[in-house]
Amino acid sequence: MKPPRFSQNIMLILIISIAGLCNVELYAQSQNRPNFIVIFADDLGYGDLSCYGNPTIHTPNLDRMAFEGQKWTNFYVGASVCTPSRAALLTGRLPVRSGMASNKNRVLFPDSKNGLPQTEITLAEQLKKAGYATAAIGKWHLGHKEQYLPTNHGFDYYYGIPYSNDMDRVAEYPNGDYWSQQDDAIKTEHFNVPLLRGTEIIERPANQNTITKRYSDETVKFIKEHKEGPFFIYLAHNLPHIPLFASEEATGKSERGLYGDVVQEIDHGVGLILETLRDEGLDENTIVVFTSDNGPWLPFKENGGSAGLLRAGKGTTWEGGMREPGIFWGPGFIKPGLVTDLGSTMDLFATFSRMAGVEIPKDRIMDSYDLGPTLLNHDSSTRKHIMYYRGTELYAVRLGDYKAHFITQGAYGQFGDREEHETPQLYQLNHDASEHFNIAEENPEVITEIKELVQSHRAKLMRGKDQLAERE
Amino acid sequence: MKPPRFSQNIMLILIISIAGLCNVELYAQSQNRPNFIVIFADDLGYGDLSCYGNPTIHTPNLDRMAFEGQKWTNFYVGASVCTPSRAALLTGRLPVRSGMASNKNRVLFPDSKNGLPQTEITLAEQLKKAGYATAAIGKWHLGHKEQYLPTNHGFDYYYGIPYSNDMDRVAEYPNGDYWSQQDDAIKTEHFNVPLLRGTEIIERPANQNTITKRYSDETVKFIKEHKEGPFFIYLAHNLPHIPLFASEEATGKSERGLYGDVVQEIDHGVGLILETLRDEGLDENTIVVFTSDNGPWLPFKENGGSAGLLRAGKGTTWEGGMREPGIFWGPGFIKPGLVTDLGSTMDLFATFSRMAGVEIPKDRIMDSYDLGPTLLNHDSSTRKHIMYYRGTELYAVRLGDYKAHFITQGAYGQFGDREEHETPQLYQLNHDASEHFNIAEENPEVITEIKELVQSHRAKLMRGKDQLAERE
């Protein structure tokens, strides 16, 4: 506990956030720029943590993090599948702008030709301008070729698997049925996924049983080695994406079965990371965010997660596909409490940039809002809408409390076929988070307002060239 | 904070719980019997508190209570509707034994002839044996005639409405449609429900707008007047049962709308009660329990609550009907943490009796298990099964992690008709709390085991005479 430093930080951030007109360059030179750690789970649902209502997955470290910090309950991702969601977080832009969304392939594959364009500015590149040491640990999935890897996108260091853990499959599922796979018959060797350090393959197939643990350990190591700060760590776990793997120590521990073991192992890692921050005296000067890339992968039944009270899951523009746990922790900065304001993973770009004193790019349209005032003072979030894209098509829009679905469609054989709605379906999400009660008829003026927003959004939309379509 | 007293209490409870063979009479004479407060909501769903995953209902006091105490996630009620659920809590017995379950009327009505039989022993009568001052504040619903009222069932004091807040209706709903009632058109005068003190009507119609607030205030008053202890308060709110009412101060405060206002007003009352306990130095010697009588009343759409990830709601034997938030707080006794063991409102009878040093009745079959070892030490709960009765019929049984549905049926026009299953539906609830994946075929041995349990349960079952059937 370092009270003097604490108050310096608070002052600094207050100045940055409240008197937002100052010359941000000034702060970039300050010694008190906070460290940032983003912990990003894969396919974890809104309802998969104890503090978000899961009955049998024990996540005491995330629960404590939420209790000591802010628990956001209207926190969104930029897309309902991996690649575009990750692009959104790191660029602060809708994937349709960067070309990281496609109607041909929803994500990148090991035979994809392209990746995140060099013209995009990542959060890591942004923070490097203010002297941050930067590390990407874990899943990348924004291009596996050398020019697309993290170390060519602003990260000093990379350790991880460059795409999803079910890719490079070299064995058939035992019973031949993809959706009803039996976990106990699936081995890490059935997937020839590489593990990289920097741009070098250091293990193939990556031992996925130990990967969660190793990602957490790498993060702890990077913190210790860069404790003089400032640093930015993007820890993107490959799990609980299916196939599920846990270490020997974690296996058989959760009443929720293997899925629970996997989530609890991630939670355990969160505990180690926060403990390291406390031990190193960095807790008052670090902000840790926990969220996930998209909703649960439901057709896998109990091997998939839960969206809690939200409708549908991964791959859809229903809430279960795109609303995620969003936990912000930072005892030196963050005012504890429940936050129901709108937020998005895309907002981390502006929020961290602002706190680090780095100017937001002005040569492109950004979709990133500074959450600082909400994090520090519970002031209203400046984000007022959420765009729900599927590929390059806008399916739904949330404006304030209301969400209009122009197109609805399930995913992976569940939740129905594509349907275009002449009168959009309308839900009041703060009253009806489960999207049960369509109130379009009673609220034509809300639909008009949302349509106007769509029109102005479309008028300015410049679509990036599709980076996901081409495969070798 | 009173460390010496604290450790005395711990010692006392450890002796009572671990060395359970001692003469309980001894402890009944002790000065350190804990006070008990049970706060019982009406129709609040599993998913209606922030700490159980609700996105827009702010319940900071209950969240803190859960964080400082134990949050139970497999905590059940004795029936999925009011009257039998309340009978179960207060008698520690399945309602089918006491006659408080019926296939003719699911609950008592203002023209019902009977009520809870005098032959039943209530938790209040039980605790009076150890010298407790006892108060029932709020909804009773176990018989409105004088001989059935709380003051004739072991409570020294009663203040409340003797049945549901939608009874004694004297006005039609504005649009004639019961399920789609418009809250803003519903007034407290549309229901001629009486408010009683003792056995006297002191207000009719009861002003329901202020009733939640007044119940909390009465509780605070009773605590202050009985601070020398020991006391037992059964605070059974009439809300958030529909029709919804909140005080002027609470109205318009919640982003969840009126339903949220109502729940937040209950939470505010919880805050006042805990604050009073702290102010009076009673926090180390009091156990507070929060739960609800049954799941949310779903056909009322956004006026009803949410069962979160659980299936269906009030009136059904699906999890949404009978699994509830269960929060145990008592800094002097309760070891904080998440508890996934089985528990039931019926267990409060044995748990409190044991802690108060009162012997459990031996002349009747009880359905009450001592939760003390779990509350104090996180030892495994001794409760291993849950019986899901609808009226006097056993519909489903949970044994450990598994639940078998012999009969399924929706309620209030939702979730389907009655269906008897030759092969019961089987769910692994710790993996699949939402009851999505029927695994009966793969687990015939589990079904056999559950059938054996049913057989032995039925062999010993003595059904009480139906007290709900007769009306005037």
Image (spheres, coloured by chain):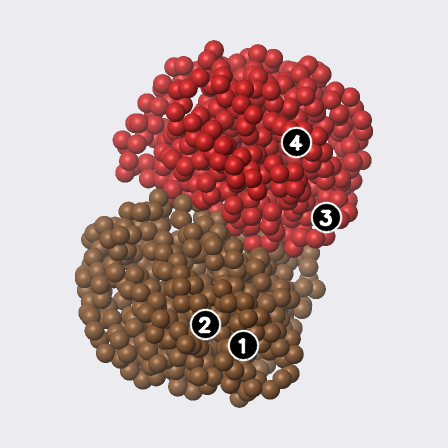
Chain colours: A brown, B red
Q: Position of residue B444 (x, y in %)?
A: 28, 32
Mark drawn on residue A36 = 2
In the rendered structure, which amino acid carries the disc numbered 4? Lys
Chain of the residue under label 4: B
In the rendered structure, which amino acid carries the disc numbered 1? Met
Question: Which residue is tagged 1?
Answer: A355
Q: Secondary structure at mark 3?
A: loop
Figure quadrant of residue B381: top left
Query: Do marks 4 and 2 share a chain?
Result: no
In the rendered structure, which amino acid carries the disc numbered 2? Phe
Question: Which residue is tagged 3?
Answer: B250
Query: Do marks 1 and 2 share a chain?
Result: yes
**Closer to the eye: label 3 or 2:** 2
Question: Which residue is tagged 4?
Answer: B227
In the rendered structure, which amino acid carries the disc numbered 3? Ala
Circles 3, 2 touching at the beta carbon (< 8 Å): no
Mark drawn on residue B454 = none
Q: Secondary structure at mark 4?
A: loop
Query: Do marks 1 and 3 share a chain?
Result: no
Q: Residue at x 61, y 56 (%)?
A: A430
Q: Is residue B41 above or below residue A27?
A: above
Total numbered labels placed on residues in the image: 4
Q: CA distance from mark 3 to mark 2?
A: 38 Å
B438 lies left or right of A95? left
Q: Residue at x 28, y 78 (%)?
A: A198
Q: CA distance from mark 4 to mark 3?
A: 29 Å
**Closer to the eye: label 4 or 3:** 4
Q: Secondary structure at mark 2?
A: strand
Near mark 2 (Cα within 10 A), the count class, few <14, some 14-19 or many ≥20, is many
